[in-house]
Image (spheres, rainbow, N blue to C red):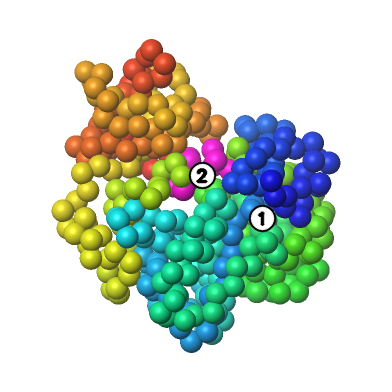
């Protein structure tokens, strides 16, 4: 079990620690609902240092990224980030990731913790012919997500950069919390605004301390992975391993918008055919019409009780006070307003298909 550089800090704060993607991670501090509400209405901080970081450098860096990723990274300019995925050779997804254009011939790929080794192997295989310089810097870097509507105001005193001027999916490399050359990225997984801060492991304790000092007047709180999950689910954001995996195509998962056929990439011909014929099943969002909590793995059934799909993510939405979830169903059931049922133990609970996000903010 790996620890992040802040594990002892979380334990001292009384965090409930759990194994997650091979790391010892804080799942909650005060409780999911309190932490969820803190991010929706104020400002909270997640330690997500378990995420993976790869540097792709050199004159062939863009060629490699274009080959392995579905989105068109040639559209990036320095200081911009892009959501993308790594398609596999069989129509599914190796991982979803964010690509940062750091400087000329230098890109940072941020990948899911559970997929670091898998992604590295996959990209390396395609790099054998292309010859970009690849460095796995995951073990040396930490990542804090400072999220919520008060994040800009709360953090402005510890950087010389005008935080309000950093647009969504843009970033700067600047001073932050007394550390030079920190990546301050206007990205996140919560739908409530804020930043993600990349720094070295040796620097993160200072960053954490200064962040909480600066945010004290804004009632800043540490937030665990459980609230991170409810926050992302209210936005309808996919979680790798739940809603997307090696067997789900980007078009089934509603990720056609990050799949650009302006270039040749891994399995692009086959994916173009899937797009042309429309997928037979789709990832849908749904809200329960009655009391109940949908959970991952629960069956989705039709009005006659026949199984038509499975819940990939589900929870009781803290913001909406109702059960919400994502799941795959045949395309005929995927239209917004369609009625389906979620098999919760012995009860088939009525649900309505809705277009995410569930939380409109």
Q: Position of residue 212 (x, y in %)?
A: 79, 52
Q: Position of residue 91 (x, y in %)?
A: 29, 55
Magenta residues span: 228-240
Q: Residue furthest left?
A: 277
- Residue 337: give its label: none
Q: Position of residue 271 (x, y in %)?
A: 25, 60
Q: Who's the residue at 29% across and 73% down the image?
A: 264
Residue 93 visible here: yes
Say which label, 2 or 1, has the lower sequence index. Answer: 1
Mark 1: few/some/many CA within 10 Å (<14, 14-19, 20+)? many
In the rendered image, which quarter is residue 104 located in? bottom right
- State how far apart marks 2 and 1 are (Cα): 18 Å
Q: Is residue 230 magenta?
A: yes
| Circle 2/circle 1 CB separation < 8 Å | no
Left or right, 336 with respect to 236, comes to left
At numbered mark 2, what does the secondary structure look like: helix, strand or loop? Answer: helix
Q: Is residue 255 magenta?
A: no
Left or right, 335 with respect to 92, comes to left
Q: Residue furthest bottom?
A: 59
Q: Who's the residue at 35% across and 26% down the image?
A: 299
- Residue 232: give its label: 2
Left or right, 45 with respect to 88, comes to right
Mark 2: few/some/many CA within 10 Å (<14, 14-19, 20+)? some
- Residue 49: give its label: 1
Q: Position of residue 45 (x, y in %)?
A: 69, 49
Q: Who's the residue at 28% across and 36% down the image?
A: 329
Q: Who's the residue at 46% across and 28% down the image?
A: 295
At numbered mark 1, what does the secondary structure look like: helix, strand or loop? Answer: loop
């Amino acid at each position: 079990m790996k620890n992040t550089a802040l594990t002892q800090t979380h334990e001292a704060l009384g965090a409930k620690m759990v194994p997650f993607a091979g790391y010892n991670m804080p799942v909650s501090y005060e409780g999911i609902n309190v932490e969820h509400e803190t991010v929706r209405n104020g400002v909270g901080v997640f330690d997500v240092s378990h995420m993976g970081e790869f540097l792709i450098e050199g004159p062939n860096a863009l060629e490699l990224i274009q080959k392995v990723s579905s989105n068109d990274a040639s559209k990036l300019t320095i200081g911009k980030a892009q959501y993308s995925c790594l398609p596999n050779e069989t129509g599914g997804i190796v991982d979803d990731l964010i690509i940062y254009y750091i400087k000329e011939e230098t890109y940072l790929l941020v990948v899911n913790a559970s997929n670091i080794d898998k992604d590295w192997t996959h990209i390396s295989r395609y790099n054998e012919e292309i010859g970009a310089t690849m460095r796995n810097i995951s073990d040396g870097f930490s990542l804090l997500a400072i999220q919520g509507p008060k994040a800009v105001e709360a953090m402005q005193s510890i950087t010389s950069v005008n935080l309000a001027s950093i647009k969504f999916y843009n970033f700067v490399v600047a001073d932050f919390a007394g550390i030079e050359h920190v990546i301050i990225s206007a990205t996140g997984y919560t739908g409530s605004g804020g930043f993600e801060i990349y720094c070295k492991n040796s620097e993160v304790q200072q960053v954490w301390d200064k962040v909480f000092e600066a945010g004290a007047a804004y009632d800043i709180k540490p937030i665990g992975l459980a609230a991170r999950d409810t926050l992302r689910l209210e936005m309808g954001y996919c979680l790798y391993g739940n809603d997307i995996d090696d067997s789900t195509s980007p078009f089934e998962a509603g990720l056609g918008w990050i799949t650009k056929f302006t270039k040749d990439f891994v399995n692009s011909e086959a994916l173009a055919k899937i797009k042309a014929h429309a997928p037979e099943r789709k990832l849908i969002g749904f809200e329960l019409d009655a009391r109940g909590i949908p959970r991952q793995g629960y069956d989705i059934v039709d009005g006659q009780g026949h199984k038509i799909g499975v819940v990939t993510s589900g929870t009781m939405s803290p913001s909406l006070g109702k059960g919400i979830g994502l799941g795959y169903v045949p395309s005929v059931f995927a239209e917004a307003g369609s009625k389906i049922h979620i098999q919760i133990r012995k009860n088939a609970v009525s649900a309505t298909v809705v277009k995410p996000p569930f939380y409109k903010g």
